[in-house]
Image (cartoon, rainbow, N blue to C red):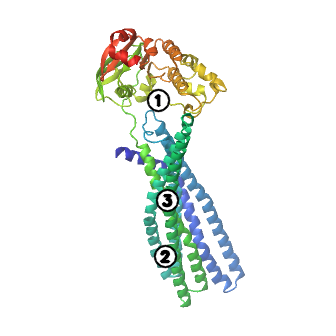
């Protein structure tokens, strides 16, 4: 619940941050609505004072007053709508930034269980809907002022008509709010289905080469057709709910206006009001459906905004990386120590990686390997023991400082749409030469297959590359970052044996004098290390050079040679 409140707090700040524009837009909108309500009153006055009793001077004077009122309401509409739209767009923009920042946060966790298309939908359409709350609020306040102004002016013309409007308008607003509730639920379901369809489409496009290779195009099309159909049906249901809500509100509004006209007509026939007052009353009766309809629209927009706000809050409140730690360390020597580390399947891991050492770690259980990497990257804090960098527990280090000293390059590292060189240098120090890293990872062979070489684009998630090519680019990016401590997980599983041997030598050469940990079962990579640590059953069971472990340890031999 705390995280959820935090997510909703971000939304409130983004929306409330445009308070000035909302206030300005509301005031100008209120001026516009007031001017609209004054027009029929002024026409009634002109009828009474310059038409029923012809008076050219009075007619000219009141026409000037009418022109001034028209100018005022025109100015109010133009600049009030501009301020409201600016408030809506600025709030939507801020929410988009918040969502994207949350999604892109290192190990942020917001993407867990959500396909990319769903996140795009949240960052675009949902952000737009929540931002539109500001516009709806601006127009809603102006519409309330319009209804009140119309009622007051009607009271001056006739107390019964004014009371009828004052009582009837709030009843209509309450009905509009009640009728909007089903629309809120339908709108949320519609957005969920649309986001899921977008996510499926994004996944299919990203994996189109694999699908074609497996000849699974028909199954993919069938899956997307089913998902798209569900999204369409949810959209239709939401549209039906919106149409029903709008239709009912228009019907109620029409009945209300008909009642006002009926009461006004009877008052005219009874002689309670004159011709000018009748004209004013009819004009106000025709004016009132406008602001009342706006209030109905505002109810529908607020329902959509609430549904979208809940989806944005879920993303913003997703459990993120561990926090805490304020120490800013000096230059790192590269010493990495694990003291009694225990978490999930790991038990009492004691390990020291000396500065500049090239260490291999073989973990017989893939789940234990993932746990070890998460603890090293501080995606989680261990239940027992701790990880220390240069003698300082990583829990005491500021997260940004830790990442600047220790980089954990996981097996499923993703590439982004851009050039090959942009991907390699994404985390590299400014002005650093990326060529040694590319040579070490054998990226020159990848560049040779691209039009434009290193300036060639590789597509979203490296879609134009094979699995082995993507691994090499990701490894080059990790090497180019040039961190004092680099932990790499299985960087060559999709690479042929000859290239793997070249990469093993390249990593050793590129990381000379830098601490490097290779979590892998590749014999080629392990043979290039100073020593290898075997973790079996969640604990360290052997530690020696690769050749000695292959010769003397059956479990190790089975893990790396079979």
| Residue identifier under label 1 | 412
Total count of labels: 3
Say few, some or many: other residues with alpha carbon within 10 Å of mark 3 (under 14 / 14 to 19 / 20 or more).
many
| Mark pair 1, 2: CA separation | 65 Å
Say few, some or many: other residues with alpha carbon within 10 Å of mark 1 (under 14 / 14 to 19 / 20 or more).
few
Query: Residue 360 at x, y = what percent?
Result: 40, 16
Can residue 129 be seen by looking at this rendering?
A: no
Query: Residue 91 at x, y = what percent?
Result: 52, 49
Tell me if label 1 and label 3 are in contact, CB under 8 Å: no
Using the image as rendered, state which of residue 70 and residue 493 is in the foreground.
493
Q: Answer left or right for 56 relative to 227.
A: right
Compare marks 1 and 3 and give the one earlier in the sequence.
3
Compare marks 2 and 3 and give the one earlier in the sequence.
2
Using the image as rendered, state which of residue 510 and residue 130 is in the foreground.
510
Compare marks 1 and 2 and give the one earlier in the sequence.
2
Q: Closer to the camera: disc 2 or disc 3?
A: 3
* For residue 1, above or below residue 186: above
* For residue 255, above or below residue 367: below
Tell me if label 1 and label 2 are in contact, CB under 8 Å: no
Give me the disc on residue 238: 3
Q: Residue at x 33, y 30 (%)?
A: 381
Q: Closer to the camera: disc 1 or disc 2?
A: 1
* For residue 1, above or below residue 169: above
Helix, strand or loop at label 1? It is loop
Q: Answer left or right for 529 relative to 239.
A: left
Query: Residue 523 at x, y = what percent?
Result: 43, 15
Query: Residue 144 at x, y = what percent?
Result: 50, 67
- Residue farthest right in this picture: 56
């Amino acid at each position: 619940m705390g995280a959820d409140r935090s997510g909703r707090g971000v939304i409130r700040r983004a929306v409330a941050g445009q308070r000035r524009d909302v206030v300005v837009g509301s005031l100008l909108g209120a001026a516009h609505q007031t001017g609209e309500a004054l027009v029929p009153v002024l026409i009634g006055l002109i009828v009474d004072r310059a038409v029923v009793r012809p008076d050219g001077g009075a007619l000219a004077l009141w026409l000037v007053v009418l022109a001034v009122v028209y100018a005022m309401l025109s100015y109010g509409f133009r600049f009030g709508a501009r301020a409201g739209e600016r408030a809506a767009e600025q709030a939507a923009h801020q929410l988009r930034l918040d969502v994207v920042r949350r999604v892109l946060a290192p190990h942020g966790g917001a993407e867990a269980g959500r396909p990319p298309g769903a996140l795009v939908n949240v960052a675009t359409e949902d952000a737009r809907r929540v931002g539109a709350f500001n516009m709806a609020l601006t127009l809603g306040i102006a519409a309330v002022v319009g209804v009140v102004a119309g009622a007051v002016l009607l009271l001056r013309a006739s107390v019964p008509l004014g009371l009828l409007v004052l009582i009837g308008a709030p009843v209509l607003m309450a009905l509009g709010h009640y009728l909007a509730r089903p629309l809120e639920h339908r709108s949320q379901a519609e957005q969920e289905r649309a986001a899921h369809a977008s996510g499926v489409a994004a996944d299919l496009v990203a994996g189109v080469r694999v699908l074609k290779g497996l000849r699974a195009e028909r199954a993919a099309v069938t899956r997307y057709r089913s998902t798209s159909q569900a999204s369409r049906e949810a959209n239709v249901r939401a549209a039906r709910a919106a149409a029903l809500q709008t239709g009912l509100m228009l019907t109620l509004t029409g009945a209300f206006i008909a009642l006002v006209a009926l009461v006004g007509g009877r008052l005219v026939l009874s002689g309670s009001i004159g011709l000018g007052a009748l004209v004013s009353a009819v004009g106000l009766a025709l004016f009132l459906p406008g602001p009342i309809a706006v209030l109905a629209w505002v109810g529908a927009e607020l329902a959509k905004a609430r549904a979208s706000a809940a989806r944005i809050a879920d993303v913003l409140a997703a459990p993120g990386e561990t926090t805490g730690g304020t120490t800013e360390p000096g230059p790192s020597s590269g010493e990495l120590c694990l003291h009694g580390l225990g978490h999930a399947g790991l038990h009492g891991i004691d390990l020291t990686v000396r500065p500049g050492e090239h260490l291999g770690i073989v973990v017989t259980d893939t789940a234990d390997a993932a746990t070890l990497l998460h603890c090293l990257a501080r995606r989680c804090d261990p239940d027992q023991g701790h990880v220390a960098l240069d003698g300082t527990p990583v829990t005491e280090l500021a997260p940004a400082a830790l990442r600047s000293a220790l980089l954990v390059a996981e097996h499923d590292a993703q590439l982004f749409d851009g050039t090959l060189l942009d991907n390699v240098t994404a985390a590299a120090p400014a002005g650093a030469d990326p060529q040694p890293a590319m040579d070490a990872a054998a990226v020159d062979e990848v560049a040779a297959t691209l039009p434009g070489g290193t300036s060639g684009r590789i597509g979203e998630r490296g879609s134009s590359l094979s699995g082995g090519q993507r691994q090499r680019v990701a490894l080059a990016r990790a090497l180019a970052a040039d961190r004092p401590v680099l932990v790499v997980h299985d960087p060559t599983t999709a690479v042929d044996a000859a290239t793997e041997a070249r990469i093993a030598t390249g990593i050793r050469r590129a990381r000379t004098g830098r601490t490097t940990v290779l979590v892998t079962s590749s014999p080629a990579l392990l043979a290039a290390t100073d020593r290898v640590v075997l973790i079996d059953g969640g604990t360290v069971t052997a530690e020696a050079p690769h050749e000695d472990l292959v010769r003397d340890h059956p479990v190790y031999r089975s893990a790396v040679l079979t």
